[in-house]
Image (cartoon, rainbow, N blue to C red):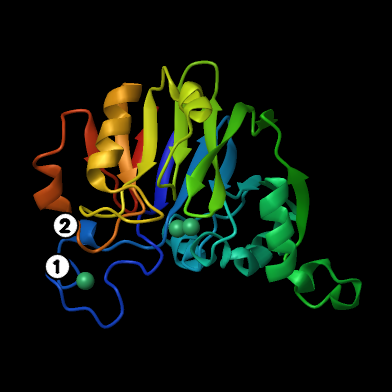
Amino acid sequence: MLITFLGTGTSVGVPMIGCECSTCASDDPRDKRLRTGLMIEHGGRRLIVDISADFRQQALRERIDRIDALLITHCHADHVFGLDDIRPLNFRHGPIPVYASENTWRELRKVFYYIFEAKHIGGGLPQIIPHIIKDSFEVCGMNLTSFSVIHGRTEVSGYRFSDGRSEVAFVTDCNLIPRESLEKLRGLDLLIIDALRHQPHPTHLHLDQSLAYIAELEPRRALLTHIGHDIKDAETNSFLPPNVELAYDGLKLEI
Ligand SMILES: [Zn+2]
Ligand SMILES: [Zn+2]
Ligand SMILES: [Zn+2]
């Protein structure tokens, strides 16, 4: 699996509009974070997890000319508002299968009502093939396991990806991982996990909590994502445990 971090920022991105804090003013490229998204390439196929309003910019940067599947964690604006930007890929390659939980689909159908209304057919709509995720399913030649994590009052889908050689999991936007979901996160080569900031937050993990989950789950390596502006890359990386780092936009790793 080749993993690319399309974006690693929280919902407002870093720098945040109107902010002059030292992270937002930093000229370290690792302190510039587009909204969170991940690309996984496997066996010549390309899967995208979450499609933020920054997807267009991410796709141009990574020269994405085709995607084979799109996976959604939850229907918050910072994870889905790039959906219209799959249209250039549709023009060339046709509809794209999109995977989400039943709850997430209920919300996606409200937010993107125009995609699903017959009267709007034609005229440059995103072309998607909706799939409801199961506990385990196959996408792009990988076995996926889905599980729920708690994000304030919302449930978010976490995903585990296995290609028979490597085990990777993506757990964004949560303040709690229920016990039964933790059991699905053991024996990982790579855990990608939410770490919003240093201070506690009602709907996201803060750094100490993320590190506590990592210590409990013992993945071979962990990368932190969905990062806000109170975390400065160089400063924070300097005190993280040896198997943990902050992810940054454009980071690629072969797992
Ligand atoms: Zn988010
Ligand atoms: Zn700031
Ligand atoms: Zn969210």
Can I make out residue 1 in this image?
Answer: no
Label 2 amino acid?
Lys
Residue 237 horizontal side relative to residue 218, left or right: left
Do labels 1 and 2 touch, CB within 8 Å?
A: yes
- Disc 2 residue crowd, few under 14, some 14–19, many 20+, Cα 10 Å: many
Q: Answer with the quarter of the image where residue 62 lies.
A: bottom left
Question: Looking at the image, which is closer to me, 130 or 125?
Answer: 130
- SS category of the residue bearing label 1: loop
Tell me: is circle 2 under 8 Å from ligand 2. Answer: no
State whether residue 215 is above or below residue 87. Answer: above
In the image, what residue occupies the spot 46% across and 38% down? 170
Q: What percent of the width, then of the height, locates residue 99?
A: 68, 45
Label 1 amino acid?
Ser
Name of the residue lying farthest toward the right: 118
Reading the image, the residue beneath label 2 is: 232
Residue 39 horizontal side relative to residue 110, left or right: left
Question: Looking at the image, which is closer to me, 82 or 230?
Answer: 230
In the image, what residue occupies the spot 73% across and 68% down? 110
State whether residue 3 is above or below residue 58. Answer: above
Residue 26: image tag: 1
Badge count: 2
Q: Ligand 1 is in which quadrant of the figure?
A: bottom left
